[in-house]
């Protein structure tokens, strides 16, 4: 149902060629739901994700050839149409709600004035959060949440007061690489709120104060020494139960030296097994590349946390108008952004 007067067409940005990062704006009809739980959203803000313009070439099994190639996997906006039936009523969402969400890569993206998200993928935007933060928080915060609590061994219940979970988390140590980045920052913050006993943040010295403010107990300057060099000074006290890598490459490889034998190594950038040093004899309980999944319940927990703490830590590099979409993606693709680049699809 909808109480909004909807236009017949909308502005939409497409990637015409999967082998090119050039984007094009055009007029198109409003999207029609293709899933029973699809909601129509009037998009206010969205954020590019580094590498997403290459996903169809790199990961054809995830982004099929028939994809509409509209970029933007996360966004925030207002619900203008919701499915009929008991499922929608039980979901707690209604027309007019402010929501944010992240969808699957094979679903169409949100760099358009109206888009679709499923009830199971959305969460309510907390009252303390504006559109800029709302359109740039779902992807990074969900990635960190799932890395720590779904794939890792920290217990998220500790954040909301579970005493047994808090005691368990206090026994655990974690290394987070890229700790001052958008995902790494959320990982440090959530690990601290969950009461992890040790949180080692890998960053440069310029960001030491920032990561410690987020809750890191220690900081290692990767420009001065590698993780392997740092651990080698005192392996007995410096090895950790879990390493959460947000950098990849050589940094991911050195994480093997930091994790205790039988520990856990997770990366959001690549397969840890392919980066294992020949000299390492460790056998880990888990060593895998994790991909974030849309999860409205987890995102709602994050939303509730933001409302409770009255703090959103998403680092925003810049905010650009809808017409400047190519500039936004070029900046992200060139890795010149210190934080999220937000595109204002609607005036806010």
Image: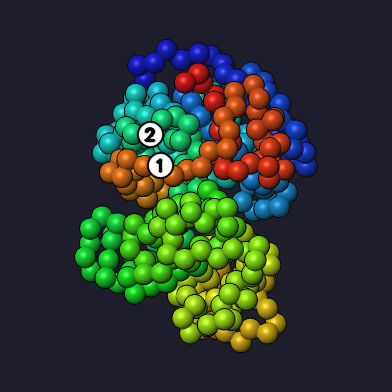
Left or right side of 328 for 174: left
Residue where numbered disc 2 is placed = 129
Q: Are marks 1 and 2 in contact (CB under 8 Å)?
A: yes
Tell me the residue at 56%/40% (across/down): 340
Tell me the residue at 70%/82% (across/down): 278
Secondary element type, mark 1: loop
Instruction: Measuring from the top left, give residue 222's x and y in whole percent.
Output: 62, 64
Secondary element type, mark 2: loop
Which one is in front, 278 or 1?
278
Query: Can residue 118 be seen here?
Result: no
Which one is in front, 208 or 328?
208
Residue where numbered disc 1 is placed = 312
Instruction: Measuring from the top left, give residue 65's x and y in whole percent.
Output: 69, 43
Q: Marks 1 and 2, Cα distance to the nearest angstrom?
A: 7 Å
Local packing at callout 1 (Cα closer than 10 Å; few below 14, some 14-19, many 20+) is many
Instruction: Measuring from the top left, give residue 141's x and y in whole percent.
Output: 45, 49
Tell me the residue at 37%/29% (across/down): 98
Comes first in the chain, label 1 or label 2: 2
Local packing at callout 2 (Cα closer than 10 Å; few below 14, some 14-19, many 20+) is some
């Amino acid at each position: 149902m909808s109480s909004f007067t909807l236009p017949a067409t909308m502005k939409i940005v497409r990637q015409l060629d999967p082998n090119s990062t050039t984007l094009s704006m055009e007029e198109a009809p409003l999207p029609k739901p293709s899933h029973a739980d699809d909601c129509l959203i009037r998009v206010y803000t969205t954020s590019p994700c580094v590498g997403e313009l290459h996903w169809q070439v790199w990961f054809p099994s995830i982004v099929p050839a028939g994809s509409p190639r509209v970029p933007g996997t996360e966004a925030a906006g207002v619900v203008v149409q919701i499915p009929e039936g008991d499922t929608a009523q039980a979901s707690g969402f209604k027309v007019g709600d402010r929501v944010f969400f992240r969808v699957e890569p094979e679903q169409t993206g949100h760099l358009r004035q109206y888009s679709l998200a499923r009830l199971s993928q959305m969460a309510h935007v907390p009252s303390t959060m504006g559109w800029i933060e709302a359109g740039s928080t779902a992807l990074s915060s969900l990635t960190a949440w799932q890395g720590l609590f779904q794939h890792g061994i920290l217990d998220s219940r500790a954040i909301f007061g579970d005493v047994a979970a808090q005691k368990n988390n206090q026994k655990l140590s974690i290394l987070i690489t890229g700790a001052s980045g958008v995902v790494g920052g959320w990982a440090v913050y959530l690990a601290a709120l969950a009461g992890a006993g040790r949180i080692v943040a890998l960053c440069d010295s310029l960001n030491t104060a920032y990561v410690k403010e987020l809750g890191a107990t220690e900081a290692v300057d990767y420009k001065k020494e590698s993780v392997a060099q740092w651990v080698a000074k005192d392996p007995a006290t410096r090895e950790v139960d879990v390493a959460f890598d947000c950098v990849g490459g050589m940094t991911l490889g050195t994480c093997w030296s930091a994790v205790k034998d039988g520990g856990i190594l997770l990366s959001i950038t690549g397969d840890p097994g392919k980066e294992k040093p020949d000299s390492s004899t460790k056998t880990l309980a888990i060593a895998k590349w994790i991909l974030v999944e849309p999860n409205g319940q987890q995102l709602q927990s994050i939303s509730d946390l933001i409302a409770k703490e009255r703090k959103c830590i998403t680092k925003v590099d810049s905010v650009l108008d809808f017409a400047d979409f190519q500039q936004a993606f070029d900046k992200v693709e060139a890795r010149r952004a210190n934080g999220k680049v937000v595109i204002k699809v609607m005036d806010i």
